[in-house]
Amino acid sequence: MSVVGARPQFVKLAPIAHAVTEAGHEHVIVHTGQHYDPMLSDVFFRDLGIPAPDTHLGVGSGSHGVQTGAMLSQMDAVLDRFTPDAVLVYGDTNSTLAATVSAVKLHYPVAHLEAGLRSFNRAMPEEHNRVLTDHAADLCLAPTEVAMAHLTAEGLAERAVLVGDVMTDVLFQIRDANEASELRTPLAGVAADGSYYLATIHRAENTDDPDRLREIVASLALADRPVILLAHPRVRVRAAEHGINLDQGSLVSRDPLAYPDLIAAAGASAGVITDSGGLQKEAFLLRVPCTTVRHQTEWVETVELGWNVLANTPAEIAAAIARPRPAATDATPYGDGHAATRAVDAIVSVLGSRS
Ligand code: UD1
């Protein structure tokens, strides 16, 4: 059983769903409903060929406790209805934590995909979600050597397996399919290829403090070329609340894109500016320079290899986006594009006998 609820989890689910079916196992998909806007949810199922969820909890938005609690209050019954041999949870969202807590208490074996990532920033809700999930899970599926080292440092080495990063699997497939279909960047009418920066900003730490959001928006408005901001609903809501204009100077806001369009748009950009975890890595895999508007990153390899720079003040953001192109690299810290098959093999061999 896979439990998903938020946009990045649908991306990770795609190669897993394929690999589970390929290996001849039954796969139940539970959608918590954390993300419900069609552009944050339905289009991912459609574009990535993911089977429709077997059940949908429809929890919607709310404060952390309300949202997580709404999921928890329904998950016990879902587990008892489907009695899975193993439960797979993804990443670090409230959906991840809720499914984990419910499953382990009912003694269903839990595997955590994307285990071992750490920002060491305890103000991030995701940091608590991932630490708590790793420590509760029976099997920690790590995407990188660095993640394995964190799990080892926390005494979880015996439960950990390095499988690689499933987002690499999806990205390579979509990039190749886009090239084969000659998909034009969806931003063609807005800015010519190579002449714009692509931006996403949605994290609570950047959106919920009006001064912080105002400063980031002002920095992007001063960029030397158009900055196309793909605005998550959260940033739109917060900007409207605080009277912050998302269309000023170089800054142009647009709605979020479907995944193949996002990859085409990122690949054709002069650089990515983001606070998303996934997009930092996608930029690296596409070899597009990335500026990350955060104080830490879980994907330290992108920084060490020179393709990602952490920038927070207006001066840092301006310097980072105008920096020269990094040195070419053929490093593959995120695996070979076959992580999903390895993850499914590990789940079957480690958890299959326990159920
Ligand atoms: C969640 C994850 C975050 C992940 C992100 C991907 C947690 C704690 N955070 O953050 O790690 O990077 O998903 O996008 O789980 N909203 C809508 N429509 C939707 C969903 C949300 O309008 O379909 C708005 C609502 O105002 C909501 C706000 O966005 O209150 C925040 O949504 P929520 O799911 O709580 O967190 P994200 O910021 O999306």
Image (tube, rainbow, N blue to C red):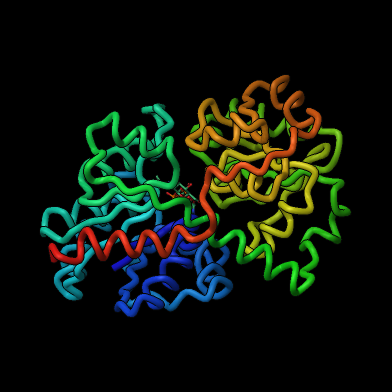
Measured along the vertical axis of the image, is residue 291 above or below residue 59?
A: above
Quadrant, the N terminus: bottom left
How many numbered marks appear?
A: 0
Residue 17 in the image, given as x and y percentages of width and height: 41, 71
Residue for point 66% across, 43% down: 330
The quadrant of the rendering that contains the C terminus is bottom left
The relative height of residue 23 versus residue 252 in the rendered view (above or below) is below
| Whether residue 67 is visible | no
Between 144 and 3, the one lying in front of the other is: 144
Picture residue at 55% right of the left edge, 35% below the top: 301
Residue 208 image point, x, y percent: 51, 35
**Residue at left 51%, top 33%?**
297
280 or 142: nearer the eye?
Answer: 142
* Residue 187 x %, y %: 79, 58
In the picture shown, does residue 181 fall above or below 247?
A: below
Quarter of the image where one finds residue 158: top left
